[in-house]
Amino acid sequence: MIEARLAFDKVSCLRGDRLLFEGLSFVLSAGQAALLTGPNGVGKSSLLRIAAGLLPPAVGTVERSGRIALAAETAALDARLPLGDALGFWAKLDGAGESDVARALDAMGIANLAPVPVRMLSTGQRKRAVLARVIAGNAPVWLLDEPGNGLDTASLDRLAQAMADHRKAGGIILAATHQPLGLDDAMPIALKPHNESPVA
Amino acid sequence: MSAWTAIVLRDLRAHYSGGGAVLPVVFFLLVATLFPFAVGPDGVLLAKIGGGALWMAALLAALLPVDRLLAPDAESGVLDQYCVRGLSDEGVAAAKIVAHWLGFGPPLMIAALPAAALLRIDGATLIKLEAGLAIGTPALAALGLLTSALTLGLRGAGALAGLLMLPLAVPLLIFGAGSFGGDGMGAIKLLAATCLLLLAVAPFGAGAALRAARE
């Protein structure tokens, strides 16, 4: 595996005519995590999209090495397919196998849901399925948008465990969140409504 | 198996298991059935205009699924996930064109057989029609996907798609229906040229549109 790295250098984000944040710099290397916090609409999801390469930064550069796994608000799982097959499709694209899917389902405690069509899943179960997709992909860089939303306490513990394992294996995590995720030693990145400079 | 083939297979599976394959075919047959009602049961006249009528029906059937080709994948974040995995937008568009054609071209060519019988089309014309559809439906698929990408995320995308796509499909209609006059080889060759052009342009146009839609 290539040494994972994610570096923002003086990145600014412009959405429409609005400047969401500017001059944001941070570096995450293997095993490190960062927690992205701030009020709604401050640009947390946009920052994750920039990190994922889905949005070009208005100013500044983003360096990434290592494959990226993104858990966004959208599930990107085929509603009609059984959960196992829906995850299997992404595992195939990620070069992972059925054993990786099984391991990920197990890690999120939804192994029993593998034959259930995705459209039948509850909000929390769907969220766990998305996290299972991230785990199964074996990508070193995890970008998580509100990963704890809709999860019960037991699932939050499983998520914390999965993130700890991932970092132990040299992975990077960048998570936007409003709630504690058990990433106590993570670097805080607090985005503030514009006119105040972001603190990294 | 490469990511590209996996995308084609996924789309095909969703298409055939979700019933999306049936709708354009039924629509095509319905238009073919309506024609004798409108023109009257004059066999000679129907045979004369039948080929052109079926080309019209094929064109309208191709328009039917356009607003659902990319929108569900864009809304559910599947297209974003392709991009995060480093797949090019052009490659994704090309895979979608291939999957769309496989899900729509062959069924339409089969449906053309009973439709030809309804319109009293003779054997020689039927062969030209099938040859024209074999060459022309990939172009319709490419054009459909290009239109779908261009109208992605717009309100009233369905109506706009028709306005965008139908004028661009006029050459296909002219050369497709033109093959019925004379020996038709000239028209078939021009149809093939149009098809190649559309197939070459569509993945790049659609790729650029997907990129623009992401921002």
Image: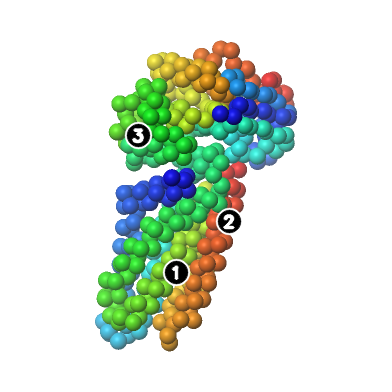
Given the image, on which type of amino acid does mark 2 rest?
Answer: Phe
- Give left or right: position of B9 versus B142: left
Q: CA distance from mark 1 to mark 3?
A: 38 Å
Q: CA distance from mark 2 to mark 1?
A: 19 Å
Residue A133 screen position, x and y as percent: 44, 31
CB-based contact (under 8 Å), mark 3 and mark 2: no
Chain name for mark 3: A
Residue A21 screen position, x and y as percent: 68, 30
- Give left or right: position of A8 versus A143: right
- Give the residue pinned by disc 3: A84
Nearer-the-camera pick, A31 or B213: A31
Residue A61 screen position, x and y as percent: 70, 34
Classify A66 as above or below B191: above
Residue at left offset 30%, top offset 82%: B122
Q: Secondary structure at mark 3?
A: helix
Residue density around tag 3, few if under 14, some if 14–19, many if 20 or more, within 10 Å: many
| Residue A132 location, quadrant | top left
Q: Which mark is residue B204?
A: 2
Classify A10 as above or below B200: above
Q: Which mark is residue A151?
A: none
CB-based contact (under 8 Å), mark 2 and mark 1: no
- Give left or right: position of B200 versus A25: left
Chain name for mark 2: B
- Give the residue pinned by disc 1: B136
Residue density around tag 2, few if under 14, some if 14–19, many if 20 or more, within 10 Å: some
Given the image, on which type of amino acid does mark 3 rest?
Answer: Gly
**Discs 1 and 3 carry the same chain letter:** no
Classify B131 as above or below B208: below
Q: CA distance from mark 3 to mark 2?
A: 33 Å
Chain name for mark 1: B
Given the image, on which type of amino acid does mark 1 rest?
Answer: Gly
